[in-house]
Image (cartoon, helix red, strand yellow):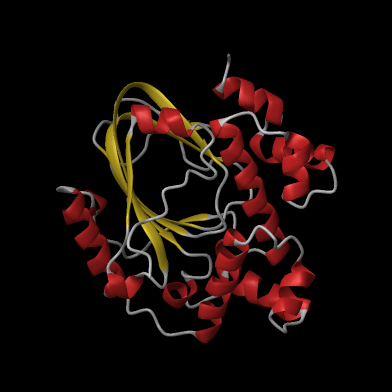
Amino acid sequence: MRHEPRNDDRGILDPARLHRDLRFRRYLSAAPLRRYVEHYWFVDWNVTAAFTQRVVPHPAVNLVFRHDDDRSGPVPSPGSEDGSASVRAPGSVEVSGVARRLFSITLAGSGRVCGVQFRPGGFRPFWRRPVAELTDRRLPLVPAPDPAEVCAGDDDDRRRALDDFLLGRAPEPDPSADEAMRLADEIRTDRGILRVDDLARRHGLSTRRLQRLFVGYVGVGPKWVIRRYRLQEAIEQAAVGVPDWATLAADLGYSDQAHLVRDFTAVTGVTPTAYVRSLHPR
């Protein structure tokens, strides 16, 4: 059992700026919820200029409680495909499914977000429907508590509010959800897993059953999960230094460096070299 939330910044494209300009922190949930919940994440901001953060999403569902203190100007809606501006309501509660594209959020004025990142497969016992229905979608949670109340007080108050809300939803035990969570966590932590058929053979499963399990419980197929976690490792390494791209491509299971470059560019919108230069200009 983990006693601290994972503190890696995989997927955050400019983690230094995030930690410098906003108050961002992670916490574990109450013990009975940890089989389903990766961590809670809190963001508080008070900015004079709009702050935009880009994230390469994890294969995870998030529950997001947001309260804006200042609505003096329009900001792009999170996840909007055209970036069009709209005036945000003072608060919102959304279920954010697995996003296969780059996620961008713009924060203006001041406000607070209290988020729940579920483990891949961990939202299904609360949702009780195929999680693929949520993929690439953001849906309002109805009914939902007032986000201003959930995000009120200090961090301990917020943790208790989220614990109470989730425990009140009474997740149903589901052995298939447990299996999906275990397999997804194995993909995340074992860099040797590079192919779906290798994972299936390791556990005596058919690739067809593995595919159905991931689509129904994680929201995306196992191949996508493998590629996303490996790509996030490349992004994380680039954020802290200048990697040997050819060696890294081989380590992460890419056929060659060019394949990694194409994948990296398609997901982030910039080449690996340009990304490194943006973070390490010297």
Q: Point out residue 272 in the picture as x, y percentages from the top left corner.
A: 69, 31
User: Is 142 located above or below residue 238 in the figure?
Assistant: below
Query: In the rendered image, is residue 58 in sight?
Result: yes
Corner quadrant of residue 167? bottom left
**Would residue 81 be visible to someone looking at this image?**
no
Most foreground residue, 147 or 84: 147
In-image side of 66 versus 227 (left or right): left
The x, y position of residue 56, in whole percent, is 57, 44
For this view, does 53 lie left or right of residue 249? left
Task: Name the spot of residue 58 as percent of width and height, x first.
Answer: 55, 53
Pick the front one: 78 or 142: 78
Residue at x 53%, y 65% (from the top left corner): 120
Front-lying residue, 268 or 135 = 268
Q: Residue at x 48, y 84 (%)?
A: 174
Residue 50, x across and y down, in percent: 40, 24
The mark total stands at: 0
Q: Residue furthest top?
A: 282
Vertical arrangement, residue 147 with respect to residue 220, above or below: above
Which residue is nearer to you in this view: 73 or 257? Answer: 257
Q: Residue 160, located in which quarter of the rendered image?
A: bottom left
Quadrant where the C terminus sits is: top right
Q: Residue at x 42, y 70 (%)?
A: 36
Q: Residue at left 67%, top 23%?
A: 274
Name the quadrant of the N terminus: bottom left
